[in-house]
Amino acid sequence: MTLGSGPSDSDTCEDCCSSCPDDGGGFHPSIFSDNRAAVERRDYAKLLATVGGLTAVGSLTAPLAGLTRVFERSYTGPVYSDGIYLVDGEGERVSESALAEGEKMTVFPEPRPGIERAPTLLVRHAKEAYSGGTKLEYTVAGYAAYSKVCTHAGCMVSNEEGETLVCPCHFGKFDPTAGAKVVGGPPPRPLPQLPITLSSEGYLIATGDFEGPVGAGGE
Ligand code: FES
C-alpha cells in the first residue's frame, strides 16, 4: 500500500530533493547529518525537523506535523547517554507496558539543557521476531529503538506498510525487526539503533547514544 504522496520509488535524491513533499515549510536537511560532533556546532537555527506521525496505535499515515527545533543552538553533547529516560510526546516517561507487541511510537530523550526533542522510533516485538541486524543486547523486553531521521535526506520516517517503516519523502523502507536495514528506496544505510534497558522503576532508559550517525551522510 502506498502511503502519502510524493515521488516514485525510482526517484533519487539528486533528482527530486528540490521538490520533496514536505510539511509546507520546504525541504529540510537532516537535523543531525553526523559527524554529529561537527554538525552540532553549526547553525542550529536552520536545523528543523518534522516531528509527529508515529503513535502507539499506528496513525502513521498522518502528515508530518509542525516544525520543532531539536537542539538549542549551543548544544554540543550527545543525543542520548547512559540513564537518559525515553519520554513520549507529552514528556511522560515510557514504561515497560507502554506498547504491546507489534505496536510503535515516537519517543524522545528526556529534555535536558540543549535537547528539546530528538525523535526516536520505539517498536516492540517478540524477541524471536528479531533477526540479524538488530542488536539484541540493545533491546529490552522486546523493545528496540531507532533514530527516526531518515539516512537518505533527513526526513522523518513517519509512515508504515505493515511492519515496515516508510519514509514519505522518497519511500525509503526500513525493517525494524532486522536492525532497521534498508528494504526499499534510496537510503544508503539502516536507521541507527539506540541501546536501551529498563530502569529499576520499570521505565525505558538509554544506555548510551545511537550506535551510528543519525540522519543523512555519516557513512
Ligand atoms: S529522505 Fe529520501 S527516502 Fe527518506
Image (tube, rainbow, N blue to C red):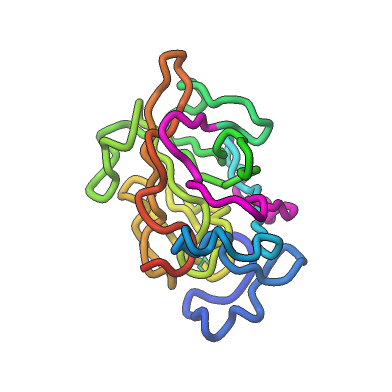
Question: Relative to the observer, which residue lies in front, 139 or 61?
Answer: 139
The answer to whether residue 40 is left or right of residue 51 is: left
Question: Relative to the observer, which residue lies in front, 95 or 196?
Answer: 196
Q: Which residues are magenta?
A: 60-86
Question: Relative to the observer, which residue lies in front, 62 or 82?
Answer: 82
Q: Quadrant of residue 207?
A: top left
- Counting the numbered discs, the total is 0
Which residue appears farthest toward the left when viewing the image? 132
The answer to whether residue 197 is above or below residue 37 is above
**The C terminus appears in which quarter of the rendering?**
bottom left
Q: Is residue 176 magenta?
A: no
The x, y position of residue 79, in whole percent, is 50, 46
Q: Is residue 78 magenta?
A: yes
The answer to whether residue 199 is above or below residue 182 is above
The x, y position of residue 198, in whole percent, is 40, 23
The x, y position of residue 125, in whole percent, is 37, 34
Q: Residue at x 66, y 79 (%)?
A: 19
Q: Residue at x 49, y 28 (%)?
A: 99
Q: Residue at x 35, y 49 (%)?
A: 211
Question: Relative to the observer, which residue lies in front, 210 or 146?
Answer: 210
The answer to whether residue 67 is left or right of residue 57 is: right
Q: Residue at x 55, y 58 (%)?
A: 40
The x, y position of residue 158, in whole percent, is 57, 53
The answer to whether residue 52 is left or right of residue 34 is: right
Could you tell me what secondary structure mostly forms the magenta stretch? loop
